[in-house]
Image: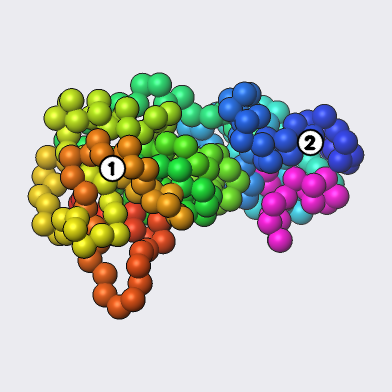
Amino acid sequence: METITARTNEKIKYAALLASSSSKRAEYGEFFLEGARLCSDAAQTGISVVRAFFTKDALTKYESYIAVIREKCDECYTVSADVAGKLSDTGSSQGVFCICKVRDTEGVSLKRNGRYIALENVQDPSNLGAVCRSCEALGIDGVIVSGGCDVYNPKALRAAMGSSLRINLITADNLPVFIKKANGAGMLTLASVPSSDARDIRSFDFKDGAIICVGNEGNGLTEETKSVCSSTVTIPMEGRAESLNASVAAAILAWELKR
């Protein structure tokens, strides 16, 4: 393998650009991934690995993970510790990095009786990743993402622990329009709100599926999205807490969808 020692190398600069810029990820259709297990998992899942970088220490320490990556990727490089420092977004890098193709979600569509969590303008990448992880673990049919954080944000990818590379992801440019179409197809659509006026999540029967919408961390769902949903729904709370963290709320709602 060729060794890269310069932080100004064009391949390294491109990798760093993908790691830092959502707009560039969208423009080039590629994203940056860090971590031995995460990169290996992407390769095993069927994600197209375009380019990979490993430190010399990583080649020994994470030999089994790297073997999987190298089997799927023809363009692999070793990098110096200094270059790895430029690429890493973590305090203790494992020295394993990949550039991957963004998944093609054009063919992903809603199942008539599917169970989905929709996220509107969720800003915290850790919340987004945690939602994907919970939804995969609970067997939710997919996560609909509208606005907010990019699912390929490095922090979101780490928080998802690979789930966002496996679960069905659907992008909705305009959630109210998307919900209207789902309503037209006969799906139950619910807006989750921290309000005692909304129906208790436990009062619904989800045998025929549903979409439950979760809003922004600070402002919740937009009024437009709430107005087009079939009903509003809430998670009963005690004490003086006014609301739940977005990822926690989504996990509870996902559990009720499958219960």
Residue at 68% over, 47% down:
96
> What amino acid does circle 2 point to?
Ile
Residue 127 appears left or right of 28 = left
Quarter holding residue 48: top right
| Residue furthest bottom as drawn | 239
Quarter holding residue 67: top right
- Percent from the top left, x then y, of residue 239? 30, 78
- Percent from the top left, x then y, of residue 71? 59, 33
Residue 240, above or below 202:
below
Residue marked by disc 1:
226
Q: Secondary structure at mark 1?
A: helix
> What amino acid does circle 1 point to?
Lys
Is residue 85 visible to us here? yes
- Percent from the top left, x then y, of residue 35? 62, 50
Residue at 61% over, 35% down:
22
Looking at marks 2 and 1 on the same chain, the residue that comes earlier in the sequence is marked by: 2
Q: Secondary structure at mark 2?
A: helix
Instruction: Say if the magenta span includes residue 88.
Output: yes
Magenta residues (range) = 81-98
Q: Residues within 10 Å of mark 1 (few under 14, many from 20)?
A: many
Instruction: Say if the magenta span includes residue 97.
Output: yes
The mark found on residue 241 in the picture is none
Residue at 83% over, 45% down:
83
Q: Nearer the viewer, residue 206 or 120?
A: 120
Residue 19 appears left or right of 133 = right
The mark found on residue 12 in the picture is 2
Residue at 75% over, 31% down:
14
Residue 25 appears left or right of 223 = right
